[in-house]
Image (tube, rainbow, N blue to C red):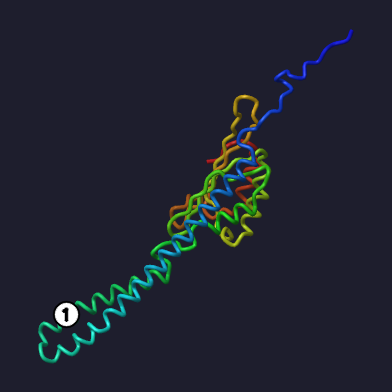
Amino acid sequence: MAQQLNLLDPRFARQTLRGSARHALWAMAGALLLGWAASQGLQWATAQAQAAAVEGDTAMAPLRAQLMAQSASTPGSAAAELLQLKALEAGQRRIRAALEAGVAGHREGHADYLVALARQASDRLWITGFALSEDGNAIDLEGRMTDASALTPYLRRLDAEPRFKGRPFAQLSLRAVDPPGGALPYTEFALRSVTGATAPATNAGAQPAQLATTVAANGKGATP
């Protein structure tokens, strides 16, 4: 018996996967642009501060000469002003030293880290969150993956990047997500580096590849 097939049936419609890797790549590109803009702004502010310090030092040169000339005739007041001038100079030297050493702010910002993350992007794994401490020592990574086995090679590739090399992740957590509506299931992961004495004794110093091996062994489970 002949049967008619309804091609307009919703069951035959193309299914759209929410939270796909393509959307994540677009989000990474936007984050990269924002990070680059923030880095440029920070570099400009640092250059302005350095120029202001140089201008202040130049403007103080005539005052320094005047105070030195007056010290012979009025030793009491001139000596006090000279001490104030020396204290001001010492403060400016500390500011210049902080700017040159990068203590006043992490000059490079997040741009280099975001470039490294984008360079190692995968269609099975993408980053949804990134945080960097002010001193650049602590890193937090959050992401999703459609295959738990993708985390092992991803962390190995990431460890080869100059910005991530030698930065062990001390904390790892996993959470399996099964979204409603027939969307593709995925696993959320979070990696956190803890420096110095703050690192947990059980996980301190663990290399990224070792943590990734734990992920592959546990599948979609969760590790503290």
In the image, taking residue 19 as reference, residue 133 lies left or right, namely left
Badge 1: few (under 14), some or many (20 or more) residues near its Cα, within 10 Å? some
Q: Amino acid at mark 1?
A: Glu
Please state the total of marks drawn on the protein image.
1
In the image, taking residue 14 as reference, residue 199 lies left or right, namely left
- 43 above or below 35? below
**Residue most toward the bottom?**
72
The quadrant in which the N terminus is found is: top right
Which residue appears at 16% of the width and 80% of the height? 81
**Residue most toward the front?**
8
| Closer to us: 115 or 14 | 14
- 62 above or below 35? below
| Closer to us: 24 or 194 | 24
Residue 64 at x, y = what percent?
Answer: 23, 84
For numbered disc 1, what is the local secondary structure? helix
| Closer to us: 158 or 93 | 93
Residue 65 at x, y = what percent?
Answer: 23, 87
Residue 99 at x, y = what percent?
Answer: 39, 69
In the image, taking residue 94 as reference, residue 86 lies left or right, namely left
Which residue appears at 49% of the width and 62% of the height? 108
- 222 above or below 75? above
**Residue most toward the right?**
1
Which residue appears at 31% of the width and 80% of the height? 58
Residue 144 at x, y = what percent?
Answer: 60, 40
Residue 223 occupies quadrant: top right
Location of mark 1 (residue)? 81
- 9 above or below 121? above
Which residue appears at 61% of the width and 52% of the height? 118
